[in-house]
């Protein structure tokens, strides 16, 4: 049996940028409706992002990034 972690790819809705993390196993899953999350989602939608669910699904993964695709399109190119 192989116990090596499997990589996961996290993509933007447009497909122009993505992160690949070392381990796809989520360490935590929750739904959040706090003011900060709702304001961030509203801001993203107002600036061209997809409309979100009222209570977004949040997954926490280990953040060992092994690959980045489309840096020019991600985080306004600040990488």
Image (tube, helix red, strand yellow):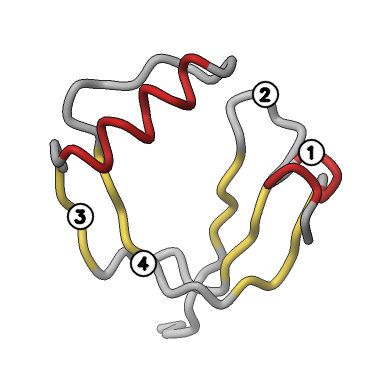
User: Residue at 17% of width from left, 30% of height from top?
Assistant: 55
**Which residue does the numbered mark 4 point to in the structure image?**
25
Q: Is residue 30 left or right of residue 24?
A: left
**Which residue does the numbered mark 2 point to in the structure image?**
14
- Which mark is in front, 4 or 1? 1
Rendering coords of residue 10 (x, y %) = 56, 48
Quadrant of residue 3 within the rendered picture = bottom left
Give the numbered dot on residue 8.
Answer: none
Q: Is residue 30 left or right of residue 7?
A: left
Q: CA distance from mark 4 to mark 1?
A: 26 Å
Camera-side residue of 53 and 9: 53
Q: Above or below — where is 59 with respect to 46?
A: below
Q: Are marks 2 and 1 in contact (CB under 8 Å)?
A: yes
Camera-side residue of 48 and 22: 48
**Which residue does the numbered mark 1 point to in the structure image?**
73
User: Which secondary structure lies at badge 3?
Assistant: strand
Mark closest to the chain's N terminus, 4 or 2: 2
User: Which secondary structure lies at badge 4?
Assistant: loop
Mark closest to the chain's N terminus, 3 or 1: 3
**Which residue does the numbered mark 3 point to in the structure image?**
29
> Which image quadrant: the N terminus?
bottom left
Q: Is residue 9 left or right of residue 53?
A: right
Rendering coords of residue 73 (x, y %) = 79, 38
Camera-side residue of 48 and 5: 48
- Which mark is in front, 2 or 1? 1
């Amino acid at each position: 049996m192989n116990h090596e972690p499997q990589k996961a790819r996290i993509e933007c809705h447009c497909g122009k940028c993505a992160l690949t993390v070392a381990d796809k196993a989520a360490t935590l899953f929750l739904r959040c409706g706090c003011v900060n999350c709702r304001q961030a989602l509203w801001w993203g939608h107002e600036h061209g992002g997809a409309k979100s669910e009222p209570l977004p699904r949040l997954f926490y993964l280990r953040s060992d990034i092994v690959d980045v695709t489309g840096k020019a399109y991600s985080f306004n190119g600040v990488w």
